[in-house]
């Protein structure tokens, strides 16, 4: 694969598809979009097969460099972290196109073009090795998403599209100023170089906050999460899938690629802020999810809670936490995407997202109930599914940093079980009190084909997570080494007590046993 | 002393003068029937003048003992001005045919304005500056009221004239004060006199000069004329006002601030920072409630001028280069935007100006809607469109000069501006269709539109060229 610009090709294919879709009729546009995304999936598989996972491999692979833009360059390259996120993107895209096959009837060409353009930008974000190129890709995603929500969204779509656009824009512009400062300071726009550059710790705080403004909104973290429920509820099904599946991951990717390695001291200094916000998010948004009557809103709030687990894992400053955060991101990308698809399936039949309008679907839609059950369990974090691995690792990581944070965040798992199982009970179990819901047909072949691959991936990730952890391991180890000097001292390390004189040993032992019982 | 080198250095102006006078004679004898021919001949004249710019550069940088400069800066600005003027001429005929005012004076007046603008950006002396400015203004007043039967047009011309004269008065007063206290009208002479500290009188002169110039670039708090004139003037004239004279006035401001007032940098920097932030904020907030697209573009131009001034506020060569690059990109966006607005005609071919009439345009006129959306997103500064790069350059210059707080504040306010650009896109793409427009646009309009859209979408490939040209332009000032 030496020298072959596979990353550029992966961006060129959907770009060409997008332009073709603009000029094509409805049915051709669907076909073009499907073919383009499938080709990209194949390219993604080729990329993964050729990615060198051995411990001695170079950190950055498939690098491309073309200084054609004056102040910044077309510089691409990936490490293991970027690789798995690219895989997530190319895996979800054909499913999104499939989910829109029948649901989108008007302006199909423009819709498919917007999605393909979105794919170009998402791959661009994860592959960019130039600071400004990254920013351009990161920000440009606003345009297609604004149009997707605004044109093909629900009743209140205009408010949601504005809120999405302006919220995320305001977050990002401050990051741009910080980037300019960094480039002038370090004299380069090259991300790998900047990741190793030691900025003055006092300035780091400001730079960190500027980046945080952007990534916290994108993530989204409490209290700047309010755009997400609106955007999710109003977006078309595939829009929600891509929003929850990939766009939210850009925030996490930003933390892992920029905030942590570039500003380790500031990260350590402000970690309590992240922990605090995450703890609030886990408990508060889970409780909010519990009382939702709109299915999409419920899943949207659950996304905020899951993303909070990601942030605590990232700011645990150890390998377990960061690996866990990455696994939650991947697992959540699959599971929340699948849940939105499940909502889309019944929305397409009854055109309402009100939970109370459904009930007893396991009777008339058994296949649907089984798959929905699997994704519900995965979202709860049942062992054997993708989310268990990530959540367990994240919480294990944060326990080493702060046992209190671990304690509060673990309640999120219990609350998660509560709202997800409650949702499942109201939709699939109980009596069939609504005649129209009871008359809905089971999954069509197309819908099975959308959900089955995700189900397989969810189980794969839960049973053999090594496939996904292996490419990332050495990169996360490098990251851990980079931030080790600043890592906060944990409160759960094993402490050696003073040596006890032999005579009192018996008494002390009893007291210790007594203490443990508490 | 008039020597041949000086004459060759102002060759573009000579060509425009000769061309303008000859065309006026043709128009005087040929009457309105010659309008179309004269349109094309004027564009040709501008093109020839554009080619002559290289000759002017070769015989620069100083001509007529310092009264005129023919340096990379003036060439950069003039190239933009001639291009914008040519576009304003090409876009006009269809509009004037409907209004029954297709007359040959329009292109000729633009040619004369272009001479004035050329003098503005190559002035090396306050008097050259003033003569150039007035020459441009005089042509502009007439252009604003070009459709003399139309009440709004006449009103626009009158308003422009009254307020413009006031501004000229303020400017002239500032020049007089500077002359009185420094003993020179030449830019380098003033700079030398300011070098030994800025006296009270000099400070007053500086403030008055900047106030007069702020009027010409329509920066807050001297912007009041802009919305009324932009709305009232015929749309091709508005296109012209929003592009070429903006470049000329901005170029002039940059040159005066750096060449003449350079030693007093700390004094004018405060003024420029205030004017920049006020323009960004006011331009953004006041635009939100607008229902007329031309008024919206007027506030948008106020907003954009604020951003361009951020580069000047940095006061560095990189800042001056950024300001000029900003103007270059701004001109492309503006002309493209107005080429779209000029196509807003109802089924009978009458021009419409309300934003509401754009509703559902993405379904009836796909290409036109896409182009306007590109220009709007670009003006809002959203990457990957080229308008982002314009903002990037000025903020980058400010950050490099240590004005991080200014940059952070300015860029945060650009989010407010994004709101009203989004409103236009929302109307075109999200709303239910209103009464459809005329089915097809004119060929010339479409060509200009497509060219501008292509530049905005693929602009990053021009980066190396733009960087080099703007850096050379800025270097000639310092």
Image (cartoon, coloured by chain):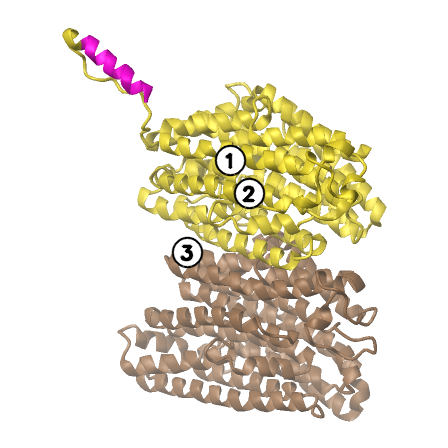
Q: Position of residue A21 (x, y in %)?
A: 78, 48
Q: Secondary structure at mark 2?
A: helix
Residue stretch rendered in magenta on the structure: A505-518
- Circle 2 packing at 10 Å, graded few (<14), some (14-19), many (20+), is many
Chain A color in figure: yellow
- The answer to whether one can see residue A296 in this image is yes
Measure the alpha-carbon separation of dots 2 and 1. Answer: 9 Å
Parent chain of label 3: B
- Residue A128 on the magenta span: no
Q: How many marks?
A: 3
Hue used for the chain lettered B = brown
Give the residue at mark 1. Answer: A415
Foreground mark, 2 or 3, reads 2
Quarter containing the N terminus of chain A: top right
The correct choice, above or below, for B64 with respect to A358 in the image is below
What residue do we see at 66% from left, 26% from top? Answer: A457
Query: Which badge, 2 or 1, comes first in the chain's sequence?
Result: 2
- Answer yes or no: do the residues labelled 2 and 1 have beta carbons within 8 Å? yes
Mark 1 nearby-residue class (10 Å; few <14, some 14–19, many ≥20): many
Query: Picture coordinates of residue A404 (x, y %)?
Result: 36, 32
Q: What subunit carries mark 1?
A: A
Camera sees residue A39: no
Q: Is residue A88 above or below residue B338?
A: above
Find the distance from the CA under tag 2 to the CA under tag 3: 43 Å
Report helix, strand or loop for mark 3: helix
Q: Are marks 3 and 1 on the same chain?
A: no
Residue B399, which numbered label?
3
Residue on which disc 2 sits: A289
Q: Dot 2 falls on which chain?
A: A
Q: Nearer the viewer, residue B468 or A285?
A: A285
Residue at the location (79% across, 75% down)?
Answer: B346
């Amino acid at each position: 694969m030496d020298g072959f610009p596979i990353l550029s090709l992966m961006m060129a294919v959907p770009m060409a598809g997008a332009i073709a879709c603009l000029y094509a009729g409805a049915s051709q546009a669907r076909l073009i979009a499907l073919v383009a995304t499938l080709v990209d999936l194949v390219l993604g598989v080729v990329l993964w097969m050729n990615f060198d996972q051995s411990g001695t491999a170079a950190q950055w692979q498939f690098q491309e460099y073309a200084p054609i833009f004056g102040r910044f360059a077309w510089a691409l390259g990936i490490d293991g972290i970027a690789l798995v996120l690219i895989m997530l993107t190319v895996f979800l895209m054909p499913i999104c196109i499939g989910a829109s096959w029948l649901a989108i009837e008007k302006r199909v060409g423009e819709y498919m073009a917007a999605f393909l353009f979105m794919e170009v930008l998402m791959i661009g974000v994860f592959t960019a090795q130039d600071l400004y190129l990254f920013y351009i890709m990161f920000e440009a995603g606003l345009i297609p998403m604004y149009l997707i929500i605004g044109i093909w969204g629900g009743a209140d779509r205009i408010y949601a599209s504005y809120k999405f656009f302006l919220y995320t824009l305001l977050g990002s512009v401050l990051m741009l100023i910080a980037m300019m400062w960094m480039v002038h300071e370090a004299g380069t726009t090259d991300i790998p170089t900047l990741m190793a550059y030691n900025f003055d710790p006092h300035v780091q705080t400001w730079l960190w906050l500027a980046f945080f403004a952007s990534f916290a909104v994108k993530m989204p973290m409490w209290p700047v999460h309010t755009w997400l429920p609106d955007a999710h509820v109003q977006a078309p099904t595939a829009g929600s899938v891509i929003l929850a599946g990939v766009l939210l991951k850009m925030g996490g990717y930003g933390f892992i690629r920029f905030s942590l390695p570039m500003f380790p001291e500031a990260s350590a200094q402000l970690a309590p802020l992240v922990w605090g916000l995450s703890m609030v998010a886990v408990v508060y948004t889970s409780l909010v999810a519990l009382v939702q009557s709109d299915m999409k809103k419920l899943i949207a709030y659950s996304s905020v809670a899951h993303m909070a687990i990601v942030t605590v894992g990232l700011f645990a400053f150890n390998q377990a936490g960061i690996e866990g955060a990455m696994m939650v991101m991947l697992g959540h990308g699959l599971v929340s995407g699948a849940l939105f698809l499940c909502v889309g399936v019944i929305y397409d039949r009854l055109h309402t997202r009100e939970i109370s309008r459904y009930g007893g679907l396991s009777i008339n839609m058994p296949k649907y109930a089984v798959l929905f059950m699997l994704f519900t369990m995965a979202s709860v974090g049942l062992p054997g599914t993708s989310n268990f691995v990530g959540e367990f690792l994240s919480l294990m990581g944060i326990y080493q940093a702060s046992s209190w944070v671990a304690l509060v965040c673990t309640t999120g798992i219990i609350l998660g079980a509560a709202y997800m199982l409650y949702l499942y009970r109201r939709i699939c179990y109980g009596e069939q009190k609504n005649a129209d819901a009871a008359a809905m047909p089971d999954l069509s072949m197309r819908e099975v084909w959308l959900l089955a691959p995700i189900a397989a991936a969810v189980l794969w990730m839960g049973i053999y997570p090594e496939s996904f952890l292996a490419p990332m391991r050495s990169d996360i180890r490098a990251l851990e080494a980079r931030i080790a000097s600043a890592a906060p001292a944990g409160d759960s390390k094993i402490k050696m007590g003073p040596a006890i004189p032999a005579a009192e040993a018996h008494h002390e032992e009893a007291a210790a046993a007594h203490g443990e019982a508490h | 002393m008039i020597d041949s080198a000086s004459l060759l250095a102002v060759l573009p102006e000579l060509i425009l003068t000769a061309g303008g006078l000859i065309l006026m004679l043709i128009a005087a004898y040929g009457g309105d029937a010659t309008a179309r021919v004269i349109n094309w001949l004027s564009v040709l004249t501008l093109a020839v003048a554009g080619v002559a710019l290289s000759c002017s550069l070769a015989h620069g940088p100083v001509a007529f003992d310092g009264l005129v400069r023919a340096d990379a800066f003036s060439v950069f600005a003039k190239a933009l001005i001639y291009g914008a003027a040519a576009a304003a001429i090409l876009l006009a005929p269809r509009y004037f045919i409907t209004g029954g005012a297709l007359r040959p004076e329009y292109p000729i007046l633009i040619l004369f304005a272009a001479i004035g603008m050329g003098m503005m950006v190559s002035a090396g002396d306050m008097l050259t500056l003033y003569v150039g400015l007035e020459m441009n203004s005089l042509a502009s007043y007439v252009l604003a009221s070009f459709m003399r039967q139309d009440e709004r047009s006449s009103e626009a011309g009158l308003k422009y004239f009254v307020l413009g004269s006031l501004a000229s008065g303020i400017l002239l007063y500032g020049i007089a004060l500077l002359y009185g206290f420094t003993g020179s009208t030449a830019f380098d002479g003033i700079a030398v006199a300011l070098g030994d500290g800025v006296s009270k009188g000099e400070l007053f002169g500086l403030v008055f000069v900047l106030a007069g110039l702020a009027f010409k670039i329509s920066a807050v708090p001297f912007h009041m004329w802009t919305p009324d004139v932009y709305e009232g003037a015929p749309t091709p004239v508005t296109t012209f006002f929003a592009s070429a004279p903006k470049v000329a006035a901005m170029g002039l401001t940059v040159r005066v601030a750096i060449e003449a007032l350079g030693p007093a940098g700390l004094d004018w920097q405060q003024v420029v920072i205030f004017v920049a932030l006020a323009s960004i904020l006011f331009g953004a907030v006041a635009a939100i409630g607008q229902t007329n697209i031309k008024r919206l573009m007027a506030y948008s131009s106020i907003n954009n001028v604020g951003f361009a001034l951020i580069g000047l506020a940095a006061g560095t060569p990189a800042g001056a280069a950024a300001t000029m690059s900003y103007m270059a990109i701004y001109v492309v966006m503006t002309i493209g935007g107005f080429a779209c607005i000029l196509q807003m005609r109802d089924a009978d071919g009458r021009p419409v100006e309300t934003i509401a009439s754009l509703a559902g345009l993405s379904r009836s006129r796909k290409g036109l809607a896409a182009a306007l959306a590109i220009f709007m997103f670009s003006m809002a500064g959203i990457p990957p469109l080229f308008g982002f790069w314009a903002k990037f350059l000025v903020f980058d210059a400010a950050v490099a000069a240590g004005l991080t707080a200014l940059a952070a504040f300015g860029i945060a306010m650009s989010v407010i501006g994004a709101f009203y650009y989004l409103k236009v896109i929302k109307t075109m793409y999200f709303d239910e269709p209103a009464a459809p427009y005329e089915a097809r646009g004119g060929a010339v309009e479409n060509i200009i539109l497509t060219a501008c859209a292509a530049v905005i979408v693929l602009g990053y490939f021009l980066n190396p060229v733009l960087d080099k040209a703007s850096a050379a332009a800025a270097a000639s000032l310092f």
